[in-house]
Image: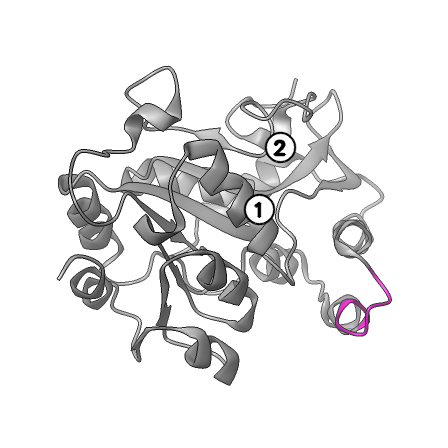
Amino acid sequence: MPTPTHRSARGDVTSLADGWLQVLSTHHADPKADVDRAKPGLELVLLDMDGTLVEGSSWEMVHEAFGTTNQANWERYQRGELDDAGFMRSDIALWHVGDGERKHVREIEEVLARAKLMPGAHELAQGLRERGIATCVLSGGIDILARRVCEELGLDMYVANGLRLLGTGHVSHEGLVFVEIRDKSRVTRDLLARLRVPRERAAAVGNSMYDVGMFRECAYGIAVNPSDFAVRHHARHVVEGKDLREVLGHLVG
């Protein structure tokens, strides 16, 4: 049976609370109750994962472990020849080539367990938690890693893309798209509405042009170790290095 440790194992993806938004550290039945509305300032911080909270890309980690590359698929996606679902399908199909058997979710979990957190990730999470600011990982990466990161750092919730599993726990060729890689604006708007957080009391942290959609829907964005001009241009603050402790000062200073 598929391991029930992440949303990839879920069969029903139609429910809002049981679909794209996964709540971990909530102290209440409804995640809206975790947002501290009594204090001034921020209520919610959205955090990109790949390249922001962890080193590298979760998808690329799996490809590297299995001796494959998704460069050709990525270029097709960039040209608009593949949508998000098609990109994920083409990516996942590469993992199954060679040994004649579909990869099991345990193999994916083992690879992603080796992902390294960015310096200062624990301090950032702790600082936000101590100030009553809710946190959500919002990533086009793999939800297996998003859950692990949330559990390790004590973050409240995540929205990330999943893998559709067979009853045996083996990975099918289909992915579960909850976050559009090119544009996070729609899921950001949906999340703020779901949690009833006004735009002016939300901030976002990311490292690339694919996080600009989050920045646009929040009061301001912070670019960390920026990989391109676009994310620099749309950020209110830019942290040049990877140390996330510097981010905390911009959020609560």
Q: Secondary structure at mark 1?
A: helix
Q: Would residue 111 be visible to someone looking at this image?
A: no
Residue 79 belongs to magenta span: yes
Instruction: Kindly identify the amino acid type of the residue bearing the numbered disc 1.
Output: Val
Asked if residue 223 shows in the view, the reply is yes
Q: Quadrant of residue 156?
A: top left
- Image mark for residue 8: 2
Q: Residue at x 60, y 62 (%)?
A: 60
Asked if disc 1 and disc 2 are in contact, CB closer than 8 Å, the reply is no
Q: Residue at x 56, y 66 (%)?
A: 210
Residue 224 on the magenta span? no
Q: Residue at x 67, y 26 (%)?
A: 13
The dot on residue 187 is: 1
24 and 21: which is toward the camera: 21
| Residue reaching furthest to the bottom | 229
How many numbered circles does the render carry?
A: 2
Question: In the rendered structure, which amino acid carries the disc numbered 2?
Answer: Ser
Q: The N terminus lies in which quarter of the figure?
A: top right
The image shows residue 139, relative to residue 147, as above or below, that is below
Residue 66's place in the image compared with 177, above or below, is: below
Tell me the residue at 32%/28% (across/down).
Answer: 25
Alpha carbon of mark 1 to alpha carbon of mark 2: how far?
Answer: 18 Å
Q: Would you call the spot at circle 2 few (<14 residues within 10 Å), some (14-19), or many (20 or more)?
A: many
Residue 164, position as x, y percentages in the image? 72, 34
104 sits to left or right of 49: right
Q: Which mark is residue 240?
A: none
Between tags 1 and 2, which lies in front?
Answer: 1
Q: Magenta segment range?
A: 76-82
SS class, disc 2: helix
